[in-house]
Amino acid sequence: MTQQGKQEWLSRLQALGPGILLATAAIGGSHIVASTQAGALFGWQLALLIVLVNVLKYPFFRFGVEYSLQSGETLLEGYRRQSRGYLLGFVWLNLIAAVVNTAGVLILTAALLQYFIPVPVSLTLLCCLLLLVCVLLLLAGQYRVLDKVSKWVMVLLTLTTLVAAVMAWQKGMQAPPDYVAPSPWQLAYLGFLVALMGWMPAPIEISAINSLWLKAKQQQNPVSRANGLFDFHLGYWSTTALALVFLALGALVQFGSAQEVALAGGSYIQQFVGIYAKTMGDWSTLLVAFVAFLCMFGTTLTVLDGYARTINESFQLLGWQHTNNHRSYSVWLLLQALAGLAVILFFKSSLGPMLTFAMSLAFVTTPVFAWLNYRLMQSAGQMALWIRCLSWVGLLYLFGFALLFIGWLMSG
């Protein structure tokens, strides 16, 4: 490799950060729970759907990076430049998503933490302790902490998951030869499909958060368009590949078994760790639980930081607060944490349905966020024909499926 080539790769590695954070935020409930459940319930039948959703959402996540790299503004500043109404719509939807998604990822993280507690401890108490640790970390380090933690989490989770998948593949499908798989293409499973797609690869408002992370990265180290898109593509398509790996684990190990698949996210965590134990041996239980916990802990950190950043900047752009600094960020971080905890306390008797609600809400709001991003990118300049066409196909799919789901809820 020439000296110039080495320098180009070095600059790409230095640009890594926002895309890895995107992956850390994504590989949480959608992968550990929903993707693995999809494989456990339906085998390989939903593999193409997972790929399709990631491909159709791709332009709208990419717009967040590309707009920021081209204009030097975040998506939120772009929304405000377009119309105050655009930003207002984003803010109200984002406030709901911030609270519900914070509660959702906290539940899963706390469920994994229970593996390491020798005495019974309530899920709500663990949520409180986790929130305290996450808030203190973010108040102390903000982006620097996120940047470092996310990279280590991604490496550990990817290696462990790939090893487990290879071992499961060598053993082959565990389903009996005469097992007849249920079809996911029935109205009865529409709620599951919507929940799967809602957080796949992540709630789409993460695109706005990603533009804020990119802005923070730019303040540390200027990032070129090519390097910024390299970072984004590495993070985005890694989440797609890992979603398929998690689906494979569920299909190879749990599909067709006598054990009933738990649909509640917190309850399924135990089955998820059990999948690794079956493929790698009982010795791996605590190791896998620890790696999965790190993954969800990283997701919790990114969710808390990202939504607090968007709310902080949004309120400043709307003129509802006069500052956008560490102090105002800290206030919103604390309020978001308390609101998420309040939701957990309120729904403590039905945490599983609450998590499903969070994932379904993410899908229903996805078309709105996708349209906002498309309109903004369209106004910023020319788009390649292929990405314009893919955007329109994605919008038609997302709006159509969301309307179908709303109609199904109303009829039920």
Image (cartoon, grey):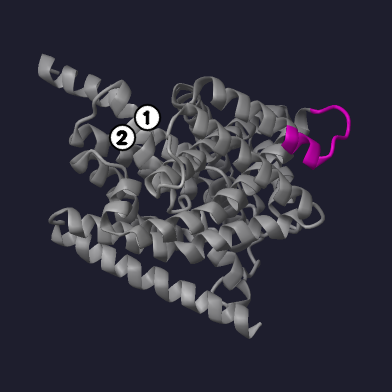
Residue 277 falls in image quadrant:
top right
Residue appearing at x 43%, y 61% in the figure: 89
Q: Please say if the residues under marks 1 and 2 sit with CB atoms less than 8 Å apart.
A: yes
Residue type, label 1: Gly
For the N terminus, the quadrant is top left
Residue appearing at x 76%, y 33% in the figure: 115
Residue farthest along the right direction in this orientation? 119
- Magenta range is 117-128
In the rendered view, does 335 fall on the left or right side of 27?
right
Residue type, label 2: Asp
Q: Foreground: 257 or 245?
A: 245
Residue appearing at x 32%, y 54% in the figure: 79
Residue 196 is tagged as none
Residue 293 falls in image quadrant:
top right
Q: Mark 1 points at which residue?
A: 17
In the rendered view, does 241 fall on the left or right side of 307?
left
Q: Name the residue under label 2.
A: 231
